[in-house]
Image (tube, rainbow, N blue to C red):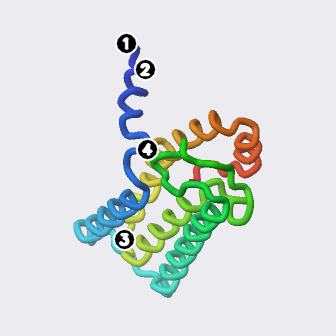
Amino acid sequence: MSERRDRQGVGRVLELKVPPLLLFALFAAAMFGLSWAAPATAFSLPGSRAAATLLALSGLGIALAGVAAFRRHKTTVNPLVPSDASSVVASGVYRHPRNPMYLGILLLLAGWALFLSNTAAALLLPAFVAYMNRFQIEPEERILAAKFGAPFAVRHHRVDVACLP
């Protein structure tokens, strides 16, 4: 078996397995742990609490708007079973970011990192994005493209946002 095929097989084991809200909780806990274990990486910014609150509230609002859009279109919000989707949502909050629910989670984590005021904690944000892209977003998009074809492809290319969820 080739190394590439083996890596893909191992990687597929994690695809669509960890619910994004559980992943949020795990990353938030890891960020807290890092801020506690690495106090030397702490920083202080004037207004950081207000900015953290704004980031978190923005993230929550975007994520909830994404859920509401899915509910309006009567499609599943279960991220572990994208094959249950009944439609491609391309309006409202889905007009611009490709994955507003995941963007909302990222903004919540960014707000948490700013609240913790710790560089080590903030360094987990790119790891969250990488994990979400590889094990949640890529498999979702593969399944949705196969299920919906052209309507998904048109929306996918219209709102392509590099590297962000």
- State the residue position of label 3: 118
> Contact (CB < 8 A) between labels 2 and 1?
yes
Q: Amino acid at mark 2?
A: Arg
- State the residue position of label 1: 1
Q: Quadrant of the C terminus?
A: bottom right
Nearer to us: label 3 or label 1: 1
Nearer to us: label 3 or label 2: 2
Give the distance between the C-alpha atoms of the residues marked 1 and 4, in whole angstroms: 24 Å
- State the residue position of label 4: 16
Nearer to us: label 2 or label 4: 4
Q: Quadrant of the N terminus?
A: top left
In this view, which residue lies farthest toward the left?
A: 37
Give the distance between the C-alpha atoms of the residues marked 2 and 1, in whole angstroms: 7 Å
Which is nearer the eye, 24 or 130?
24
Say whether disc 3 or disc 1 marks the residue closer to the N-terminus: 1
Relative side of 13 to 141, left or right: left
Seen at 40% across and 54% down, the residue is 19
> Contact (CB < 8 A) between labels 3 and 2?
no
Say whether disc 3 or disc 4 marks the residue closer to the N-terminus: 4
Q: Amino acid at mark 4?
A: Leu
Say whether disc 3 or disc 2 marks the residue closer to the N-terminus: 2
User: Whole-percent x and y of residue 137?
Assistant: 53, 46
- State the residue position of label 2: 5
Q: Residues within 10 Å of mark 3 (few under 14, many from 20)?
A: many
> Contact (CB < 8 A) between labels 3 and 1?
no
User: Whole-percent x and y of residue 150?
Assistant: 75, 37
Relative side of 104 to 10, left or right: right
